[in-house]
């Protein structure tokens, strides 16, 4: 008759208790407690770091007129000092050319300096970034008053009335991102036996329908934004599809822990760095750079241009979204045998013999 070894006090040995704990439901529950606590801190820290105290780092600005005169240079230096940032000057020969640079989203404002810098006209673009426009509108006249420069300000491209803070685009993009990967999670739970091709097809289906519903809600139902409907719908649908396939890719690579890299990439890093809530010149420099290459940033940039700069759409944000779609679909397809779903697998995820 076999005897089970025990410690001096009669209890099972430490390694036996540890092994039992690892095999019990308390082990994954404990791991999740620690992960969720860390995720909560990262979530709060990421958004606070990015958005709580937006500070200008570099503001691309067009200048026309007598900007090379001593008085004008003194004013621009005074503005940089007051903003505690660099005003990156882009000279243009005419005001029309400078305005076109705003439409191309190359600059955030236009300074026309006259009379050796004694007078200045500032054209801001609320649609380019309400936080930057507000900051310049407040700071430029104050600096002018100190230096004896008369400054007039006007918003040449204001935000829509239903979106006075310029946040609606961020919210609809955020909805597309989150519902995109939540949809993929639900497919993995409730439609586990889908084949790889069927999983991609149904991800595209809920993305198309979801993008339509988001657009219809904010435009037709709420009237918050006057959208170029077809373009906005397709951008949101592409965003939802990319977000869903990113989760599916990570589900293929990491199994049940796929939510961790998905949440980190799309929510912890991607959303606060997208430029939707805080314009990129006011973001910490690394985030302002990284964010444009991530799906939430690509979505916000494409949607922002579609709504406020019609006729000046850029290819870059679509290349970002398309690149992530291609990457995630390719990884999923190549390693599809590792995905826990599919009709050739039993409920535990093991392949049938």
Image (cartoon, grey):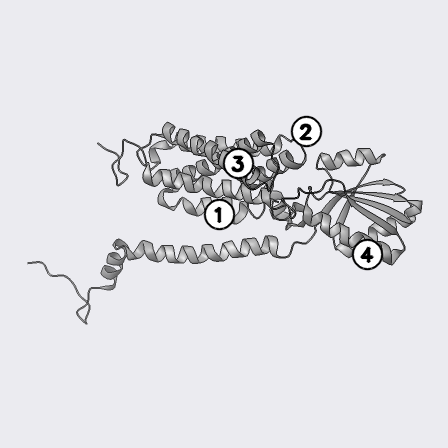
> Residue beneath label 3, please?
216
Q: Which of 326 and 153 is in front in this view?
A: 153
Task: Tell us which disc is closer to us: 2 or 1.
Answer: 2
Residue on which disc 4 sits? 142
SS for callout 2: loop
Lower position in the chain sequence, tag 2 or tag 1: 1
Q: Give the label, 4 or 1, closer to the camera.
A: 4
Distance CA(mark 2)–CA(mark 4): 35 Å
Q: Distance between the residues labelled 4 and 1?
A: 41 Å
Could you tell whether 313 is left or right of 199 in the image? right
Neighbor class of circle 3 (other Cα within 10 Å; few <14, some 14-19, many 20+) is some
Q: How crowded is mark 4: few (under 14 residues within 10 Å), some or many (20 or more)?
A: some
On screen, residue 247 versus residue 159, left or right, reads left
Determine which residue is flagged by label 1. Answer: 264
Q: Distance between the residues labelled 2 and 1?
A: 34 Å
Residue at 57 percent of width and 48 percent of height: 272
The answer for how far apart the CA atoms under marks 3 and 2 are is 22 Å
Secondary structure beneath dot 1 equals helix
Of pointers 4 and 1, the one earlier in the residue sequence = 4
Earlier residue among tags 3 and 1: 3
Task: Tell me the quadrant of the picture where the N terminus can be found.
Answer: bottom left
Marks 1 and 4: in contact by CB < 8 Å?
A: no
- Rendered view: 4 above or below 270: below
* Quarter of the image where the C terminus is located: top left
Q: Is residue 204 above or below residue 288?
A: above
| Number of residues whose C-alpha sits closer than 10 Å to that of mark 2, classed few (under 14), some (14–19) or many (20 or more) | few
Task: Name the residue located 50 percent from the left edge and 55 percent from the top edge.
Answer: 42
Q: Residue 311 carries which label?
A: 2
Q: Which of marks 2 and 4 is nearer the N terminus?
A: 4
Residue 121: x and y in percent read 84, 45
Residue 44 left/right relative to 115 = left
């Amino acid at each position: 008759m076999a005897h089970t070894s025990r410690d001096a006090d009669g209890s099972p040995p430490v390694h036996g208790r540890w092994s039992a704990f690892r095999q019990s439901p308390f082990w994954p529950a404990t791991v999740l407690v620690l992960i969720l606590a860390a995720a909560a801190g990262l979530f709060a820290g990421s958004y606070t770091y990015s958005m709580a105290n937006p500070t200008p780092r570099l503001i691309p600005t067009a200048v026309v007129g007598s900007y090379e005169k001593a008085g004008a240079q003194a004013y621009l230096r005074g503005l940089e000092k007051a903003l505690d940032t660099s005003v990156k000057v882009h000279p243009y020969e005419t005001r029309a050319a400078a305005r076109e640079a705003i439409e191309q989203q190359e600059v955030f404002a236009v300074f026309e300096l006259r009379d050796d810098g004694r007078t200045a006209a500032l054209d801001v673009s609320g649609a380019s970034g309400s936080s930057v426009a507000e900051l310049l509108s407040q700071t430029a006249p104050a600096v002018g008053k100190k230096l004896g420069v008369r400054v007039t300000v006007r918003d040449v491209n204001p935000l829509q009335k239903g979106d006075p803070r310029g946040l609606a685009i961020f919210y609809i993009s955020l909805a597309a991102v989150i519902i995109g990967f939540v949809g993929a999670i639900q497919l993995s739970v409730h439609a586990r036996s889908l084949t790889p091709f069927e999983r991609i097809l149904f991800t595209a289906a809920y993305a198309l329908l979801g993008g339509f519903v988001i657009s219809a809600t904010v435009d037709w139902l709420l009237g918050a934004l006057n959208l170029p409907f077809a373009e906005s719908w397709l951008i949101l649908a592409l965003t939802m599809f990319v977000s869903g396939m990113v989760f599916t890719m990570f589900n293929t690579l990491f199994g049940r822990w796929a939510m961790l890299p998905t949440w980190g990439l799309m929510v912890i890093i991607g959303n606060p760095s997208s430029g939707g809530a805080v314009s990129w010149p006011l973001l910490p420099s690394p985030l302002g750079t990284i964010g444009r290459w991530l799906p939430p940033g690509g979505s916000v940039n494409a949607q922002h241009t579609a709504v406020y700069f019609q006729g000046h759409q850029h290819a870059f944000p679509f290349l970002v979204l398309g690149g992530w779609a291609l990457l995630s679909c390719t990884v999923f397809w190549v390693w599809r045998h590792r995905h826990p779903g599919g009709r050739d697998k039993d409920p535990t995820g093991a392949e049938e013999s």
